[in-house]
Image (spheres, grey):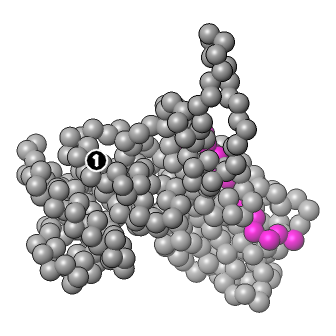
Amino acid sequence: MTADDRSILVVAHAGRDDTVQAAERVIAALRGAGARPVLAPSDHQELSAIVPALGETAVLGEDVAVADVELAIVLGGDGTILRAAELVRDGTAPVLGINMGHVGFLAEIERDDMDDAVRRVIARDYGVEDRMALLVRVKDSADAVVYETWALNEATVEKASRERMLEVVIEVDARPLSSFGCDGVVVSTPTGSTAYNFSAGGPVIWPTVEAISVVPLSAHALFAKPLVVGPQHAVAIELLERTGGDGVLWCDGRRSHDLPPGARVVVRRSERPVRLARLHPAAFTDRLVRKFRLPVEGWRGPTISNGISNGSSPASAPPVEGGGAA
């Protein structure tokens, strides 16, 4: 494959000046290296209205098929990275996040390293890490599948109206576990464990652990604590018909489906992971400390084999294989 045959998707938020400027810069660098930059249709329309020269950029799905995209460079926060994962879901392209937002847990690098990241993409100097995704199905009262989607972070069943709570039954592997009234239930991957799951009181799960977290939201029950099950198990949330409360399913905060009473949401591991490009394999502990600004002052650290104390801080500790963003 020649450089001219290489199609690189650039995903950017057109509502921020710094992101638009970064997109210009990345696209220019890709063109300068002989690669073909590609924009999603909505990004192409919005960005070319701001920067007319970007109107000549190839359009995903029109000029370039998703299957032909080599990699997606994402300029933005976690929301933009989730959108990019959705854009390339039908292909095999990994996603490389460059954080232009605040926390940016899914991002691989910060904006100051953008030029080096593009250079390494051109040189194919990056690794790829597979992250577990969820397959999500909605079934009606006759057990027929009426909606199917997927999630990288989480699938959330929430009440449709503020005034009325949901009454649900949690099920694991076709066996009922507990029923209770609540505002909703979050079913999360390890990648999503630092997102909605974390805010709702769920556990942080290391990316190397394959598991599914189940966290009730504001539950009225004695036994409605967070659960963690293995990836081989299927979790279902059934909306009880007797209460008549409607719900709504949200996946990654991007795709939604209305849930009438009697609906069942079945969540299990997807056979297709999401691929993340990695430039700097590092300890997940360091990422937690850095992104959440956790206090670690006074840490002495372990002693090494020659008896000398290791005084390196988490930010400067040597990389550890198997880490990564959540």
Foreground pick, 44 / 220: 44
- Helix, strand or loop status at disc 1: helix
Main SS of the magenta part reads loop
Disc count in the image?
A: 1
Which residue is the site of mark 1?
A: 116
Percent position of residue 55, x then y? 14, 76
Q: Is residue 210 magenta?
A: yes
Foreground pick, 245 / 99: 99
Specify the amino acid type for callout 1. Answer: Asp
- Residue drawn at (53%, 71%), measured in percent from left and top? 253
Q: Is residue 65 visible?
A: no
Percent position of residue 164, x then y? 77, 86
Quadrant (top left, top right, bottom left, bottom right) of the N terminus: top left
- Tell me where the magenta segment starts and ends, as one range: 205-220
Quadrant of residue 208 within the rendered picture: top right
- Residue drawn at (51%, 30%), measured in percent from left and top? 318
Q: Which residue is most to the right?
A: 222
